[in-house]
Amino acid sequence: MPLVDPVTMSSSIAKGGVAAARSSPSAATGKATTTSSSPTTAVAKLLPVQLQQTPASQYTRHAVPALLAALFVARFQSLVADPVATMYSSLPVVAALQMAYALACLPIAGAAGSGGAGASARKPRPGDKKKTAGSGSSAGGGGGGDAAGRRPYPPVTAFLSLILTALATPFLFAAMVLFGAPLLTHPAHTLLCAAHLAVLALFPLFYVHGVDTAAWAAVAACQAPFDDTFGGLVGGLAGAWLGAVPIPLDWDRAWQRWPVTILAGLYAGYLLGRALGGSWLLWGKKF
């Protein structure tokens, strides 16, 4: 049996590996390329949310912001006098208005027009056409079908979105504390303020995107296109942040107490951002 020099053998193997890598660079980097390009592809597929084009949708789209603004103005004095009781009692009304807006105006998660990557990226499966024929969503239905032809029920989706909104509220509470909100002296104030922020800004996004990770990654990275839902989120966050400016000023006004100005900025910013996001000025555009 001939002797084999281990040094020579290892050198030959190394040279062969280098030559193979040079001749086929895509084979060595194919997995990394696929992994790194997938988030960009998912973000690119996210489209702006298209509202339902029905008379009821158009009426609700303009009526709900007016009712939210009227509710806040009507209860402003009560908010200054007793913030906790006022925010607690008005939260169900705000949630009901947001649910009415979602049911009448927004497409359901996964349906055409919801903007998510999953609705348009799923390849047709055998039997889809046969099972879904005659059961497609109408202009005002707001529901899409799954692979088995079952159509989501919008009230159930709205209820599940409300549960997700409630689950997200503690995280907003923690974020507000990290940004300087009083934790030990005003925990109820901060928690209710976070709940209002979640119901206004996050609930519509949960309704149209569900738990689509690609859509939420785009929203978190500020790469989502502007529409009514994303514009409301950006406006609400910016308004709440700007609302903190008057608090440290030594004007000795009753409305400077926590979190009156935060809530005022939140509502004003949300309504303005939602209006601009759904207008021709910003709709479909990105940061």
Image (cartoon, rainbow, N blue to C red):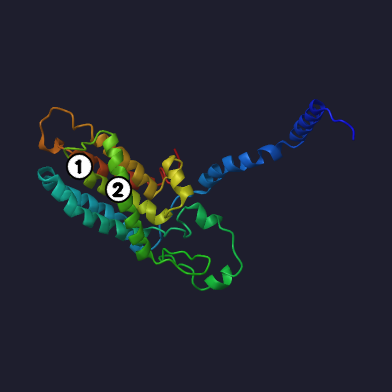
Query: Which residue is depicted at the point 19% across and 53% down?
Result: 90
- Residue 234 screen position, x and y as percent: 35, 42
Location of the C terminus by quadrant is top left
Secondary element at tag 1 = helix
Q: Work out which residue is located at the far top of the displayed protein and give it.
A: 7
- Disc marking residue 169: 2
Location of the N terminus by quadrant is top right
Query: Which residue is depicted at the point 18% across and 29% down?
Result: 248
Q: CA distance from mark 1 to mark 2?
A: 13 Å
Query: Which residue is depicted at the point 53% across and 48% down?
Result: 45
* Dot 2 amino acid type: Thr
Instruction: Provide the residue designation for mark 1.
Output: 187
Disc 1 residue crowd, few under 14, some 14–19, many 20+, Cα 10 Å: some
Q: How many marks?
A: 2
Residue 186: image quadrant is: top left
Residue 56: image quadrant is: bottom left
Residue 174: image quadrant is: top left
Say if residue 215 shows up in the picture: yes
Report whether 252 appears left or right of 92. Answer: left
Disc 2 residue crowd, few under 14, some 14–19, many 20+, Cα 10 Å: many
- Residue 208 screen position, x and y as percent: 41, 55
Q: Where is 241 relative to 113, above or below? A: above
Q: Work out which residue is located at the far front of the displayed protein and give it.
A: 1
Q: Work out which residue is located at the far right of the displayed protein and give it.
A: 1
* Dot 1 amino acid type: Pro
Q: Where is 186 relative to 105, above or below? A: above
Secondary element at tag 2 = helix
Report whether 8 appears left or right of 199. Answer: right
Say if residue 63 shows up in the picture: no
- Residue 158 screen position, x and y as percent: 35, 60
Which sits in the foreground, 173 or 74?
A: 173
- Disc marking residue 205: none
